[in-house]
Amino acid sequence: MTDQPRFLIIADGAFGPETSKTADCAIRYIPERVAAVLDGSAAGRTAQDVLGFGGSIPVVATLEAGLNLGPTALLIGIAPRGGRLPDEWRGWIATAIDRGLDIWSGLHTLIGDDAELAALAIAKGVRIFDLRKAPDGIPVSNGRARLVDALVVLTVGTDCNTGKMTAQLELLHALESRGIRTRFVPTGQTGILIAGWGIAVDAVVADFVGGAAEQMVVEAAKDAEVVLVEGQGSLIHPGYSGVTLGLLHGSCPAAMILCHKVSRRLIGEYHKGTAWIGIPPLADMVRVYEEAAGWVHPSRVIGVALNTCDLSEHDAATAIERAARETGLPATDPVRFGADPLVEAIAQAAARRRAAGSATPA
Amino acid sequence: MTDQPRFLIIADGAFGPETSKTADCAIRYIPERVAAVLDGSAAGRTAQDVLGFGGSIPVVATLEAGLNLGPTALLIGIAPRGGRLPDEWRGWIATAIDRGLDIWSGLHTLIGDDAELAALAIAKGVRIFDLRKAPDGIPVSNGRARLVDALVVLTVGTDCNTGKMTAQLELLHALESRGIRTRFVPTGQTGILIAGWGIAVDAVVADFVGGAAEQMVVEAAKDAEVVLVEGQGSLIHPGYSGVTLGLLHGSCPAAMILCHKVSRRLIGEYHKGTAWIGIPPLADMVRVYEEAAGWVHPSRVIGVALNTCDLSEHDAATAIERAARETGLPATDPVRFGADPLVEAIAQAAARRRAAGSATPA
């Protein structure tokens, strides 16, 4: 995409551990590229204060204050429900373009399709990167991903925003450090931002969700022993379940990691006032995903990745022990306690796959 | 959309009971608007010869022969896998525009987005109707459809192309003739062509499949006792399952009708060389759909609609009896033997719903 931009991240009114996923992940995985975060409600604090990581990256109150810190690009750091561009932000984007910053956005509303902003960008010679802009020519999926030699591992979730991308990024680093050739397949705007390639599968035309996943898995599997696919949504989420199933059937994982935020009680409860479906026990979710995968290609859940960021150390440890007991699977919070139990499960599955020499479930 | 166009339908090399769904359905449900079908391989025959219905509608060998029969619009009558426009057809479309015909298309590739064809249409003053063009502003679904008073009935299938739209159109006419206020919700290009409204849910951005269905169900339910939603794809189809689940969770049906083509053995086998998943027993498919629906909103399969168009009378009757026995549900081929058993099941479910006064499964 580009070489080392330095981002001013817009997360106005929403910067926090649950509410600004793209901003938070950029700060966790590419902090060296983050100049500042714009959020009037948290101004004067640091990323560390707000998130518990990110060190001294400052939160500023105004666009002007952020621009004074020398960013080379503006990053839209929140992904509101439906992904549309708040009207009031257009002025900030126009100002940033006028000051020579590139624009990076993961919103459904493509900034490059905004005639006024696009014209301004051309006039100023800056680039607009719409992370959700899908390439042309994606095929309809047809199980080609089930035929790759690599072990394909998909993260699946009880809900949106449970740590499916984060788990894969932690696993990527841990597997690579063990010398296992591993590739990460980004399927959402934040993963694409971090990895520098990928397709936002929720932004393609519905018939091609599976095809986008299939195309990326086949590509990634060419030079990897393990392919880690970033999951999306949840099969039980009333708004996003279709994307989740398309991704599951398109990527044909032999193994899945179930991701859950322990404190979450209702599907989508982080979107105020819209939650009404309770999250079932983890063992039920394991069964749901294995059954749905099996309609096209058999797959097993081989581990559980919990997000315990808002729990005490003791409560987190208890939750992990309970999840392991209830599912009979290795469990951890890969950010808080390391990914080792999941790395071990994946390494064993990859070894079994090598030994069997065939495309069977892990 | 428009008043009574008279169509020349392009189905070149593909006109037949299994291979030209849009053409076939137009001939079945709006034959008075069909001037001719263009297919060199069947030229000289009639629709009746090729399909077993459609009377004397002629099949012609060349565009010119078709144009001589006085059409006012060109209809792209096949929906190739992936929905893209074959290159060689662009010339026919250009000629038709040049001769003053409107263009109707259900392809994913929007004809109106083709700069050359769009400019030609403007110059000639003809209209381009892209049936798969989605409206702006579709929301993310969130179960609003589960709250409507009407009985929502979704057709679901073992595969694509099993009769999900046809079953609903037959039920629409049968329910209306019983005096039950019924509305049909079209979710694909052919349904939209026939009904004159709707959204092709497989053509919207993936995040909004459920929202498109939800929006249409809520609208249709305002003045109907029964809402019949056209189903799409199959939960076990490796290419289209995501659309199917999004539609299921967005429309929140209280009742489902399972549609199956009896002679079909493998998912997608009508697309040559790509089929590899066997179709499970119907009772298993009932369980799959009820379980997947229940992740968001409980629903029951209340009947089976079989497509027996390529079977003998005896084999068709045997298949219907077997389906009823295996599932314990009313079954029929609504085109061949009438929709009565399904109409009865829907009428009973609607009556139970009125009596219960609540949004419960049928």
Image (spheres, coloured by chain):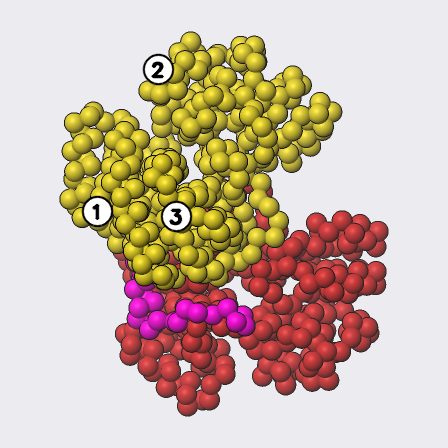
Chain colours: A yellow, B red
Work out whether mark 1 precedes mark 2 in sequence or the reverse, and give the earlier one.
2
Q: Which mark, residue A15?
A: none
The spot of residue A112 in percent (x, y) is: 64, 34
State the extent of the magenta-drawn residues as a range.
Answer: B271-300
What residue is shown with label 2?
Answer: A49
Foreground mark, 3 or 2, reads: 3
Secondary structure at badge 1 equals loop
Residue drawn at 44 percent across, 15 percent down: A57
The N terminus of chain A sits in image quarter: top right
Q: Earlier in the sequence, mark 3 or mark 2?
A: 2
Question: According to the image, label 1 marks what residue?
Answer: A329
User: Is residue A104 rendered magenta in the image?
Assistant: no
Give the residue type that dot 3 points to: Val
Query: Which residue is the site of mark 3?
Result: A226
Q: Give the residue displayed 33% in from the left and 73% down from the top.
A: B281
| Chain of the residue under label 3 | A
Q: Nearer the viewer, residue A208 or B351?
A: A208
Query: Which of the two residues, B185 or A50, is positioned nearer the viewer here?
Result: A50
**Nearer the observer, disc 1 or disc 3?**
3
